Image (tube, coloured by chain):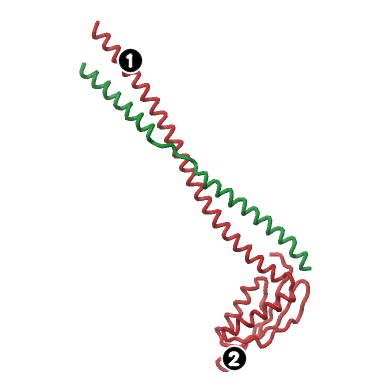
Amino acid sequence: MIKKIFITLLLVCTVSINYILLTTVPKAKLNKEIQNKLLDIDTTNALIDVYSNLVKELIPANAK
Amino acid sequence: MEDKKLFYTFITITGILNVCLIIISTLGLNKYIQNIQIINENNKNIGEVNNKIEVFKQKNNFQKADLKVLKKRLNPNTSIASYIEQLDIKTKERNVIITKSTVTESSNENINIDLKLYGTFNGVMNVAKEIESDLPLTEISNSKIETKGELIEMTLNIKVYLNKND
């Protein structure tokens, strides 16, 4: 009888501890700021490429 | 009879508790895996941002240098003249005098300049290096050094390419 009560109590404790752990550990979030920064850098790089290509195409024509 | 009833009750309670434990464990494991994946993704993004910033910095510096050269080459005759004028001011600070700066040949493709620098050995060498770094598409040929006491006179033949795409 005591054995059974002990096992039940042990199980109840394990379940409650696990439940508390599950609810208290926060869920990680994707850092949107970094993703936005990545987008910014990509856009700026692309703009620089476009600009430098334009300059390369326009300047020799002017120099002649 | 009483014992059997108690036994069944015990089995039911422990069974329910075990099922709860399995569900909670599965949810926890799932959360843990998701968290690790998100943290890895964040770290990867941070690394990528740092790399891209480095590339961006290099690109930005390169573009500046590129534009500087292109600006110099836009109107070759005036820009070369103004460059030599600037060089004259810079060289005086280093006790180097430009004794000769003649454009020997000028075309759409290149400009040849004869330059004579007079001053201390270190000063003249620094100025020559500076010219080479200021005008990247430049060939320095036929350089001669004549010693005049403690000072030297360096003759340089500079060929500046104008419309070469690098």
Q: Identity of the amino acid at label 1?
A: Thr
Q: Who's red, chain-wise?
A: B
Element on which disc 1 rests: helix
Residue that appears at 37% across and 23% down: B20
Element on which disc 2 rests: strand
Which label was assigned to residue B147? 2
Residue sitting nearer the eye, A38 or B158: A38
Residue that appears at 26% across and 23% down: A9
Q: Which quadrant holds the N terminus of chain B?
A: top left
Q: Position of residue B23 (x, y in %)?
A: 40, 25
Q: Is residue B34 above or below residue B71?
A: above
Q: Is residue B85 above or below residue B4?
A: below
Decide: few, some or many residues near mark 2? Use Cα within 10 Å; few <14, some 14-19, many ≥20.
Answer: few
Residue sitting nearer the eye, B55 or B109: B55
Q: Who's green, chain-wise?
A: A
Decide: few, some or many residues near mark 1? Use Cα within 10 Å; few <14, some 14-19, many ≥20.
Answer: few
Residue that appears at 59% across and 88% down: B119
Q: Position of residue B31 (x, y in %)?
A: 43, 34
Q: Position of residue B100 (x, y in %)?
A: 68, 87
Residue reaching furthest left?
A2
Which quadrant of the view contains residue B77? bottom right
Which label was assigned to residue B12? 1
For the residues beneath circles 1 and 2, the answer to whether they share a chain is yes
Mark 1 and mark 2: Cα distance apart in space: 107 Å
Q: Identity of the amino acid at label 2?
A: Thr
Q: Earlier in the sequence, mark 1 or mark 2?
A: 1
Left/right of residue B105 with respect to residue A16 in the rendered view: right
Q: Position of residue A27 (x, y in %)?
A: 43, 37
